[in-house]
Every structure is written in structure tokens, then in C-alpha cells.
Image (cartoon, rainbow, N blue to C red):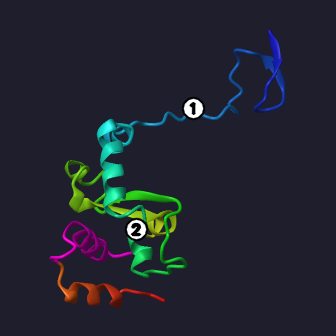
Amino acid sequence: MLKSCKYCGRVHDSKYDCGSRPARIYKRNSAADRFRYTVAWQQKREEIKTRDNYMCQICFRNLFGTKKQLNYENISVHHAKKLEENFEKRLDNDNLLTVCEYHHKLCDKNEIPYDVVERIITEQNHPRGVEAENIKTLHTYSQD
């Protein structure tokens, strides 16, 4: 059966491969991708957001180009150590932080140093046990 090809615009048999048809790309489902849909992750994500009062913790500390200090819009939970690199820490409170979309992108591009994220997580997990020295150190990273 002759048909107009939507890829090359010519008319040829429907079973003929003209070479213009793009290759099919199959999305690979890694363990990290599958993990994001589990009940365990959904519960842990809510636990971390509750711990962080549903606010971006980097905006709250007025670090790295913050425009709105009490930011609770477009928040998500960031893995300080990437899932693909450290899958066993996927549900550890010491590896999770609530951030806004802007700061999440900066964290993923490593524009916010890991040690800053780690100190903020430590503050969130142990709010009374953090020394004033750590808080001062965080503000040295501020890039206002």
C-alpha cells in the first residue's frame, strides 16, 4: 500500500524504510528512576519537607542568590549525594534537604558546594547541637 511518508514527504510503500525515520529512543529505567515512585520515597520526602517547615533551606539562610528568604514555592527534596552515585543513602536524613527549584538546579550543577549543603542538613537534623561557628561559616559562602 502506497502512503505519504511523514518523515521524508515522499510517497512509497508503508513497509519501506526510507532512512528518514528517527531511531526510537527507549528510556532506561534505572534503580534511581524506579525509586522515585516508591511509597518509601514519598513518605520520606514528606518527612523531610515537614522537618524543614516546607521552606527552601538555602533561601531561608539567604545564601546563593536568594530573592525571597521565606520561599515555600516549587520546593523539592534534594539528595546531597546523588542517587546514582550513592544509592544506599537514598533514605538517610543526613543526605536530604528541602530546596526550591532554583537552588536545586544550582546543587545539581555543583555551584553550591557539598560542604555547605552538608552543614545545612546537619543544622536541620541537630538544631540545638550546631555550634555558632558553623553558622558563621555558612554565611561566608553567601554570594549576595
The residue that disc 2 covers is 107
Q: Secondary structure at mark 2?
A: helix
Above or below 112: residue 143: below
Relative to 70, is 120 on the left or the right? left
Residue 111 within the segment the image draws in magenta? yes
Above or below 106: residue 26: above
Q: Earlier in the sequence, mark 1 or mark 2?
A: 1
Binning the other alpha carbons within 10 Å of mark 2 as few (below 14), some (14 to 19) or many (20 upward) gives some
Measuring 19% from the left and 48% from the top, which residue is drawn there? Answer: 88
Above or below 120: residue 62: below
Binning the other alpha carbons within 10 Å of mark 1 as few (below 14), some (14 to 19) or many (20 upward) gives few
Residue type highlighted by circle 2:
Cys
Q: Which residues are magenta?
A: 110-129
Q: Position of residue 44 (x, y in %)?
A: 30, 48
The residue that disc 1 covers is 24
Relative to 73, is 39 on the left or the right? left
Foreground pick, 101 / 75? 75
Q: Position of residue 56 (x, y in %)?
A: 43, 68
